[in-house]
Amino acid sequence: PRYFALLPAAGVGARMAANGPKQYLPVGGKPLLRHAVDAFRASSLVAHTYVVVSADDGQIDGVLPPGLDGVTVLRCGGATRMDSVLNGLRVLHGQLSDTDLVMVHDAARPGLTPALIEKLVLGVGDHPAGGLLALPVVDTVKRAGGSGSDQVATVPRTGLWLAQTPQMFSYALLLRALGSAPDANAITDDASAVEMLGLSPRLIEGHPRNLKVTLPADIRIAEMYLAAAE
Ligand code: C5P
């Protein structure tokens, strides 16, 4: 099969409280987005990488210069992450075939490595529902009450995982899942849209270094992992 990467990078990074979108913040000497793109470019498994940005993005050319080997920028970002992915898939109609495998990866996860990409590809294999990198929950999980933060219950952590990306599905399945998902705001990852079709994507153990940079403090943690050997 052929493997492709699709990175939604059209978010505004509201939780980062930074100047400008977080995908362009400097992390370990490179813009945040560039790390994951370079991991896909370095993987011999990945045929091509597509990056979805908003139509009015003024910074992407400085980060991914036109003509950069192995990458194409799509200016079709949407209002939500799901819309950005779905718009990208629709733009690629005709270039990707139904059985091509698409790895969707958050631009905000700079710690991805070719080794993790390979682990996902080998772990998912030809599973019809695709699969994703994820981490088993190690903390004890509490569920708070509806309004406040008073504890009301402890959720057994057995069988609980934290979803990471990349999440990999066939082009046809991902398009069908996202195209039929009821509420874009309720979909925070691609696997949940696939689950709504009654399918069970496979969980492949990822790595803490593949964290999502969400809050300012996450940048230091990401830089620590980037400085360390894999
Ligand atoms: O905000 P959050 O960290 O959950 O975003 C995850 C990824 O989705 C980021 O790479 C972000 O740029 C992307 N995104 C997008 N379009 C949106 C919102 C988020 O491509 N409308």
Image: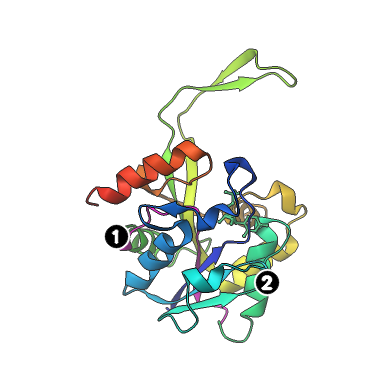
Q: Which residue is mark 1?
A: 115
Ligand 1 lies in quarter: bottom right
Residue furthest out toward the left: 229
| Residue 197 visible in image | no
Left or right: 79 as drawn, with respect to 154: right
Left or right: 228 as drawn, with respect to 208: left
Q: CA distance from mark 2 to mark 1?
A: 30 Å
Question: Is 86 included in the stretch rendered in magenta?
Answer: no
Against 143, residue 123 (above or below) is: below
User: At which x and y percent is residue 89?
Assistant: 63, 73
Q: Which residue is mark 2?
A: 76
Magenta stretch in the rendered image: 97-115
Disc 1 packing (10 Å; few <14; some 14–19; many ≥20): few
Contact check, label 2 and label 1, Cβ < 8 Å: no
Residue furthest out toward the front: 19
- Identify the residue at image location x=50%, y=39%: 216
Helix, strand or loop at label 1? It is: helix
Helix, strand or loop at label 2? It is: loop
The quarter of the picture where residue 153 lies is top right
Quarter placement of the N terminus: bottom left
Q: Earlier in the sequence, mark 2 or mark 1?
A: 2
User: At which x and y percent is residue 17?
Assistant: 60, 41
Residue furthest out toward the right: 182
- Identify the residue at image location x=72%, y=65%: 179
Q: Nearer the viewer, residue 25 or 45?
A: 25
| Residue 135 visible in image | yes
Q: Nearer the viewer, residue 24 or 110?
A: 24
Disc 2 packing (10 Å; few <14; some 14–19; many ≥20): many
The quarter of the picture where residue 125 lies is bottom left
- Identify the residue at image location x=64%, y=14%: 152
Going by the numbered disc 2, the residue's amino acid type is Cys
Left or right: 133 as drawn, with respect to 95: left
